[in-house]
Image (spheres, rainbow, N blue to C red):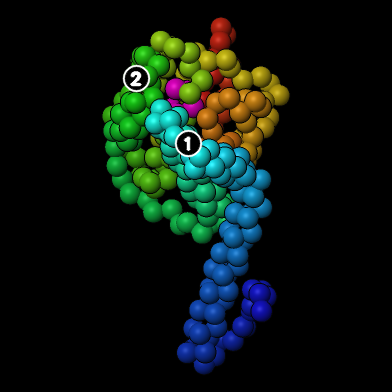
Amino acid sequence: KGNFNYKGNVSSPKELAQLCRSMENMATELARLEQVRKDFVSNVSHEIKTPITAIEGYATLLQDCSDPKSEAEYVEKILYNTKRLSELVGNVLLLSKVDNKAIQAKKTTYRLDEQIRQSIVLLEPKWSAKEIEFDVDMDEVEYMGDESLMFHVWNNLIDNAVKFSPERGLIKIKLKRTDNKITFTVEDEGCGISDEEKKHIFNKFYQSDSSHRAEGNGLGLSLVKRVIDIMKGEISVERTQGKGSVFT
């Protein structure tokens, strides 16, 4: 009936005690899934309207269109908003699962510097279009952590640096290991982040670009923060002396 606060409190015989523990584990997992569902509905309900409205509008225009050039433009807009919708849903679900510990971290040992290089290569179409250059200085670092979750960290941080960098800008990436500490920094030449924005930048759906000119849904940095917390790390952001931002 939806009451997941189940406690059996049976210690014997052994078989019944094991059954009670299994029931408690099942109730806990059901409670987590229910919370994920509630979070998804509440978080996505208002954000999902914009791309759906756009898709509906361009599909309506496409129905009565006889100009091939306009048809191609409308199809491109529909595909763009469909991709945006897909990314939004995927990010909300992943963030909800991480928030409610429905995802258990699977730790393996792998090369962190190689994973970051893979992320840079994956984003090549975006930074090539803006003719952005990279200054990369990374030590060879073996790391034990959740490879799939950590990939979201680098992908979001580097993607943001590319997004907010000017044409022909420079992005500096460093990865250093000293004793038992690993430090990663990504620095861009963008518009920077104010002190007020720094207070909210890791909150869900927060976008410093309030006009929504930049593509995004305000979930990337929130997801990054949750993953870093799970990995027992820290993340901070500073404004550089001239311009731009440095995420550490």
Side of 202 where 109 appears, left or right: left
Residue 181 seen in the figure:
no
Quarter-wise, where is residue 216 in the image?
A: top right
Relative height, residue 206 to residue 243 (above, below):
below
Front one among 219 and 243 = 219
Q: Is residue 104 above or below residue 131?
A: below
Report the magenta residues as a range: 158-162
The amino acid type of the residue labelled 2 equals Ser
Of all residues shown, which one is farthest toward the bottom? 13
Q: Nearer the viewer, mark 1 or mark 2?
A: 1
* Picture quarter with the N terminus: bottom right
- Residue type, mark 1 in image: Cys
Question: Where is residue 74 drawn, in percent x and y?
Answer: 47, 34
Query: Residue 118 is drawn in which quadrant?
Result: top left
Nearest to the observer: residue 113 or residue 133: 133
Whichever of callouts 1 and 2 sits on the residue coming sooner in the sequence is: 1
Relative side of 239 to 63, left or right: right
| Residue 150 position within the rendered picture, expressed as x and y whole percent measured from the top left | 41, 41
Disc 2 target residue:
128
Give how far apart the Cα atoms at labels 1 and 2 are.
Answer: 34 Å
